[in-house]
Image (spheres, rainbow, N blue to C red):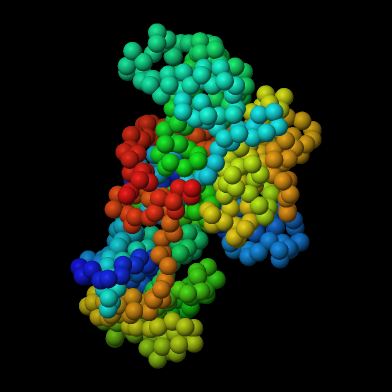
Amino acid sequence: MDEEYDVIVLGTGLKECILSGLLSVDRLKVLHMDRNDYYGGASASLTLNQLWAKYRGTEKPPASLGSNREYNVDLVPKFMMANGTLVRVLIHTDVTKYLSFKAVDGSFVYKQGKIYKVPATDVEALKSPLMGLFEKRRARKFFIYVQDYEEKEPRTHEGMNLRAVKTKELFAKFGIEENTIDFIGHALALHRDDDYLNQPAYDTVMKVKLYAESLARFAGGSPYIYPLYGLGELPQAFARLSAVYGGTYMLAKPDCKVEFDESGKAVGVTSEGETARAKKIVCDPSYLPNKVKKVGKVVRAICIMSHPIPDTNDAQSVQVILPQKQLNRKSDVYVFCCSFSHNVAPKGKYIAFVSTEVETDNPERELEAGLRLLGPIDEKIIDTYERFKPVNESSLDNCFISESYDPTTHFETTVADVLQMYKGITGKELDLSVDLSHASAAEE
Amino acid sequence: MATAGTNQRQAKLVLLGDMGAGKSSLVLRFTKGQFFDYQESTIGAAFLTQTLSVNDTTIKFEIWDTAGQERYHSLAPMYYRGAAAAIIVYDITNPDSFTRAKKWVQELQSQGSSSLVMALAGNKADLEAKRSTKPEEAQAYAEENGLFFMETSAKTSQNVMELFYEIAKRLPKLQPAAQPAGISFSERSAPPASKSSMCCV
Ligand SMILES: Nc1nc2c(ncn2[C@@H]2O[C@H](COP(=O)(O)OP(=O)(O)O)[C@@H](O)[C@H]2O)c(=O)[nH]1
Ligand SMILES: [Mg+2]
């Protein structure tokens, strides 16, 4: 390890592994270390025994839960948008060959105590019990507008410059009601709070388009896909990519202390008495605690159940978004459920997560509306973790620090952070204009 | 190229063993018929496919090389996942590499599936003069631990084809497809799966 590298990456979470892979492919010399003896850091998937060791101390998991190794419980549960940026990164890097994916059965939204399938097209809007008769027609017009909208085709703009018009003004033009705005903004465009209403409408329109196009991709019940064996496969696959392109991997490295010169620039990393030198350091917040600040706290319930979530048509995998306004909150509550159909639990078992950004002194209570949707729960683990954001100036200290994972159940924000870090490290934009038709399931 | 048989099967095959034992060289000999005295770790080539026909079955081996991750013992669980066969390679001139091969077997027994076909390859058999591990010793170890054993040379190609043929023959007859049904991204020519299995409707 007493060598010189272009980049040393600390932590094998998904973000760090994607970056490590991309940088190795760019022919940079990468050393990648983790203090743990497993891949994935905060975004690993755990076996049942590992899960119990983490949260239940010396207690052993009950035998009724089934085989330890059939469990792959995500620490950061998220689904991937079929046409989203993570899929683009996977295809761009050809990492897909190490992974298998399956579509997610359902995408639901919460309204006044009940859940409904999320309508994403004009046709679905007309059928949806989410809206009254007149509202359906207004929503249908809105969806047609979004489907047809092309920035390069002024005739599809209907006289509005979406880069200037605010989202709420666009909704107003179609006469969309508040409840409908709620599901469009939170369950389709995946906004986490209501700031977007005062932002230019372009971003929201593109996000709704992404949802609808992803939904059409695999003709399933949701726009999402998810890897067999859980998300922990993703960091491993990107780590393999990095290794294939010459990246060096060391796990179970204690300390991993970043070394700085007099001017405050990072120059290397010391572990077990050896120092590896590098021009740049990439890491998760836990490796440079003095260069990050706390920006929030996430609470989540990890639940093991013996039945699918009620009222989801027995979905083997499903996402439910509970928009903040429906719960008088500032941030949404997310429900994520996966099962043996994605090889993350033994046959007949389901793993459900309920998560949100903490707003009160009683975080567990904040999950109640989500937990109530689950029905009987065999085992429940409540956990909170703090979220950090870097506060350093990379140009001054050569450190590139990722943000902690947010409570959303999708990857769009995660990949945005990775792409921005990649640009900071290499000074160039990652070209993700890949041919998405490779991701088509329609092979027949 | 192998002729198409009546049955087509895929089998993931992984290589294990210490750095320098000749894993990448064995794969290169088997897939490309080449050998290099100063085999540099080939960038970007840690995933190769090769088909073999045994009787009426064509087996498409998906071969996973370690990509150097064996060096600091940082192979991910994904590497072992779904493997139908494994070749544990040691260098007959290096006693440490034989000791470490036994550790790799243990690792496999804890991580891999129980129906895994395991082969022990004593490589560099062309270097008889420098031999340190006797074939009898390796043979005895292999028998005790449910592996089959061969001495190979990636350099002279001795026993390389034979090694892979023997694995192909031993793969369980009615083994389910190695690749679980799912959405395929990478190749348009990926094995067709039924629409329902991909979309779980
Ligand atoms: N003489 C001899 N050298 C070999 C043989 N197989 C591999 N080598 C050499 O051993 C070194 C390491 O081989 P390599 O395939 O990179 O080993 P790996 O680290 O296990 O992948 C290279 O210099 C090869 O040329 C063999 O059968 N005979
Ligand atoms: Mg090698």
At horizontal 42% and vertical 86% (from top left) the residue drawn is: B138
Asked where in the image residue A114 lies, by quadrant, the reply is top right
The one nearer the camera, A113 or A391, is A113
Q: Give the image location of residue A313, x and y in percent.
A: 59, 44
Asked if residue B19 is positioned above or below residue A442 in the image, the reply reads below
Asked if residue B13 is positioned above or below residue A177 in the image, the reply reads below
The one nearer the camera, A117 or A191, is A117
Q: Can see residue A17?
A: no
Q: Give the image location of residue A235, x and y in percent.
A: 49, 49
Q: Can see residue A429?
A: yes
Taking A185 as reference, is A64 left or right?
right
Taking A280 as reference, is A444 left or right?
left
Asked where in the image residue B98 lies, by quadrant, the reply is bottom left
Q: Give the image location of residue B167, x and y in percent.
A: 35, 77
Question: Farthest bottom residue?
Answer: B136
At horizontal 79% and vertical 33% (from top left) the residue drawn is: A361
The one nearer the camera, A320 or A228, is A320
Asked if residue A33 is positioned above or below residue B82 in the image, the reply reads above
Taking A190 as reference, is B17 left or right?
left
